[in-house]
Amino acid sequence: MVVESRRTCIEGAPSDEENYKGVHNVKKHDANEKDDTTVFSLSKFAGGSLGSELDDGVEDRYLPIHGADSRDRPQQFTTSRFIRNERNPLTVLAKPLTAEKEKRKNSVGITPPKAPTSPQEQMVELSITTEDEADSESHTLGVETILRQVEKMMRGTPCKKNKNEPQNAMFCSPLYPESPPEIVDDRIMITQEEEARIKRMDGLVLDMKMQVTSLMQEQRSLAASLRHEGILSTQTQKALTDAKDRVVHLERETSNLKSKLSVTERQAAHYKSRVIDLEKQRKVLHNMVQDLKGNIRVFARLRPLLSIDSSPSSCVSFPLHDPDSRRMVIDTPEDKVDLTTSKPTSWEFEFDKVFTDYASQAVVFEEIDMLVQSVLDGYQVCIFAYGQTGSGKTYTMEGDTTDPEHAGMIPRAVARLFEGMQDMKENDASGKKWQWRTKASNLEIYNETIQDLLSDQNLDKKKHEVRHHKDGSTSVKGLTVEKVSSSKDVNELLMRAKQVRKTSKTLLNHSSSRSHSVFTVDVQGFSPVTNEERIGKLTMVDLAGSERIDKSGATGHTAKEAVSINKSLSSLGDVISALARDDGGHIPFRNSKLTYLLQNTLQGEAKCLMLVNLSPDEASLNESLSSLRFAAKVNSCVTRFN
């Protein structure tokens, strides 16, 4: 708002504009002229202070108007309305009261004094215009500036700024030559309470300004955030577009890959079918090879010379011109050749494989490995060691379980068996994912009695009977059968059985086995894909050593054991001879517990391997010849492959 100062003259007042130069923007104004211009009370000028509180609302005030002779005339009051300027708390807006307001004022007993009659009486008004009216020769003045100018005017302060300019008598002398009169109406005085209220209002305005500033800062921050969000939105939109393009591209690639996958799956199904067929062919061919080699095969192995042997040289030799290592020769020592007779002094034998005295356990097992595969194919396989006492049968079959290099055929065959099962379970080319169950047992035949080597009892008192079933399997009544899942489990069973097996000391062997040990592993495989089931069995037999009682020095109980051992081995020889004839005649399996137990492993589709062990000692020449002749009989036996 703009405060404008205006001077109003009553009839007879000087009209020269030069008289108004003492006050800024002084305009002539007729007292009787109706004007809506707001009027500022000059009570401060007349009495020294405004006498009432300036509210945010509207209040009615009476303004005293003093002329040059105001002491002689009653004062005139003009009813005005004061409005506080919100933009500048030091600026007061005044408007004339409407007729309704004036009437309401009179109704409460307040009567303004009579209007001045003297032409000299003057009234000074301050009018306030809006900013739209500011261009009409008005200047913006603060309330304090106007008050100071009016006070100077009322006290007679010279208004003339230029010495050459004539002074106006009215403004060059004080409006109140004497001390100002008292305030007529104390309601228009500005009190300390009003000043405190003004300060409070100033504080509120300052707070509002601070709030406005804060809101503007927040607005700018929000605008910046919106711009940032706009940038992010643009980036997100671009990323979304790129992602959609990528999705379309990936969908096309997926479609192409699905097409390729479909082709690959058809090829895989074809190859899988082909692999299954090839697996069947492999199984057939593998067992045909075993059949061509003979369902009962014979290997011969010569042990090295030991310190306990009576001669420093070996009576067994191997031809140098035998690249397949299939022949061996036994020579009679020169000091024992009888020149007066025509008896032969040298014998040559041929088997499926012969091993020299320096052949390791691993070399021997390489020739047995394919038989273990036949077990996984669902066949029964029997491997037994035969030979005189002290020829190395137990070492060949069991070896040293604590030393992998000297491990025998049993731990090696079992390890190979579990490796094959694991391979078929995980990496079978046909995708059959075989599931296997494995169990093991160990017994001995001592003096024609079956005893359980895995029983918790020190002496097995149970009567164990051999039973053959229609499906071609064999079981022993009351025998301990334990589940095994690794070769480690099997080795633990072997150690338990070894501690209770019957052994005795003889002249030919410090620890001679006095019983036949039979270790059996039964495997059952199932493929959930093809519902194919395979049942195989691996039987490993360490036969008791054949011996001559007169040379072994056996007496008493030991001699009885030797007789029983030789009888069972003789029964085994009779069975082998009957199988070799292949004339459909009777086969005497029931002549001994050993042959009856091995009945299903010596005929039909079963695979049988005989490891004949020989001593190089010249003193054992006759026993070695006996073992080789028995092995040759077995080697001539060919069972029918069904």
Image: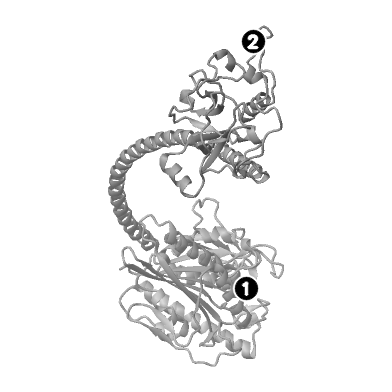
Q: Is residue 2 left or right of residue 512?
A: left
Label 2 neighbour load within 10 Å: few <14, some 14-19, many 20+: few
Q: Position of residue 440 (x, y in %)?
A: 49, 76
* Element assignment for label 2: loop
Residue at 66% of width from left, 39% of height from top? 182
> Are discs 2 and 1 less than 8 Å apart at CB?
no
Is the image coloured rainbow, by chain, by secondary structure, or in one colour?
one colour
Could you tell me how many numbered marks the image carries?
A: 2
- Vertical position of residue 334 compared to residue 21: above or below: below
| Dot 2 amino acid type | Pro
- Vertical position of residue 503 compared to residue 401: above or below: below
Residue at 35% of width from left, 77% of height from top? 472
Frontmost residue, 181 versus 191 = 181
Q: Position of residue 223 (x, y in %)?
A: 49, 34
Residue 161: quarter of image: top right
Q: Position of residue 275 (x, y in %)?
A: 33, 53
| Residue 328 visible to the viewer | no
Quadrant of the image for the C terminus? bottom left
Identify the mark at residue 365; answer none if there is no mark.
none
In the picture of the structure, the residue carrying the numbered disc 1 is 390
Q: Is residue 89 left or right of residue 384?
A: right
Residue 524: quarter of image: bottom left
Task: Using the numbered discs, state the Cα–Cα distance from disc 2 to disc 1 in whole angstroms.
Answer: 162 Å
Question: In terms of sequence position, does the residue under pointer 2 or pointer 1 come before the other?
Answer: 2
In the picture of the structure, the residue carrying the numbered disc 2 is 166
| Residue 10 visible to the viewer | yes
- Vertical position of residue 633 compared to residue 454: above or below: above
Residue at 54% of width from left, 40% of height from top? 61
| Dot 1 amino acid type | Gly
Q: Position of residue 631 (x, y in %)?
A: 48, 69
Frontmost residue, 48 versus 435 = 48
Q: Residue furthest front?
A: 72
